[in-house]
Amino acid sequence: MKIKVMITDDQRLMREGLKTILELEQDLTVVQLAENGRDALDKIAEAQPDVVLMDIRMPLMDGVECTGIIKKQYPNIKVIILTTFDDDEFIIEALKNGAVGYILKDLSSEKLVGAIRDVHKGNSIMQPEIAAKVISHITGYNPAASETKLIEELTSREKDVLQLVGKGLSNIEISKTLYISEGTVKNYISNLYAKLEVNDRSKLTLYAIENKSM
């Protein structure tokens, strides 16, 4: 079954260009295009995408607000933020609103396609450049469970996995880095959710960054 993608961007050329790129892939299909957050919300119920590529700066409703609404109404839909390098002031808010990651608009088509596939499988995506900006601009974000005692309850291997999640690595990349199976990585991440009292990958990523587990 193909991965259904919705593209939300206020630039027509960007929307149509991304659509052309994605539909070259046999396992992807673009089910809807939207020109701003409000337009996306009007169309999303009918489109029922698996993944939304979401621009940040748009008229009427920006990508940060739209992401929050989508995640409340359609928690199973994955949102990837499309950003330029100077959008860092929006990074934390969009992640807090449930985005599963950030990718820069100048990303290669091959990596964009890989990112969509990764988030569809439950991974988070954050390029190293974006992760660095999150660290340098994070100010006052406190996950509900960001207490030192919770970190101390983690095993050394769980801390290793948390550190790599904070760097934006996918499950496959973590498995290769730690020389363990992808299934074992998934088990560790489930344990981290339970122990750190978070319920999704983006919050786990923020937890890792906020607690300097990187």
Image: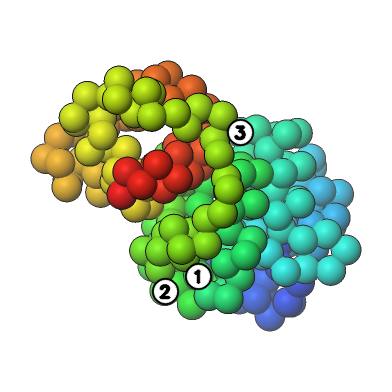
Residue 180 visible in the displayed image: yes
Indicate the amino acid at tag 1: Leu
| Residue type for callout 3 | Asn
Q: What element carries label 2?
A: loop
Residue drawn at (31%, 49%), measured in percent from left and top?
Answer: 214
The mark total stands at 3
The residue that mark 3 highlights is: 76
Q: What residue type is labelled 2?
A: Ser
Q: Is residue 106 left or right of residue 128?
A: right
Q: Mark 2 points at which residue?
A: 108
Tell me if residue 86 comes above or below residue 177 in the rendering.
below
Badge 2 crowding class, 10 Å Cα cut-off, few under 14, some 14 to 19, many 20 or more, is few
Vertical placement of 95 versus 183: above or below? below
| Label 1 crowd bin: few (<14), some (14–19), many (20+), radius 10 Å | some
- Residue name at image x 15 percent, y 41 percent: 178
| Mark nearer the N terminus (3 vs 1) | 3
**CA separation in Å, label 3 and label 2:** 26 Å
Between tags 3 and 1, which lies in front? 1
- In the image, 122: left or right of 41? left
User: According to the image, label 1 marks what residue?
Assistant: 104
Residue 95, numbered label: none
Q: Residue 68 at what x, y percent from top left? A: 72, 44
Percent of width and height locating residue 53: 61, 58
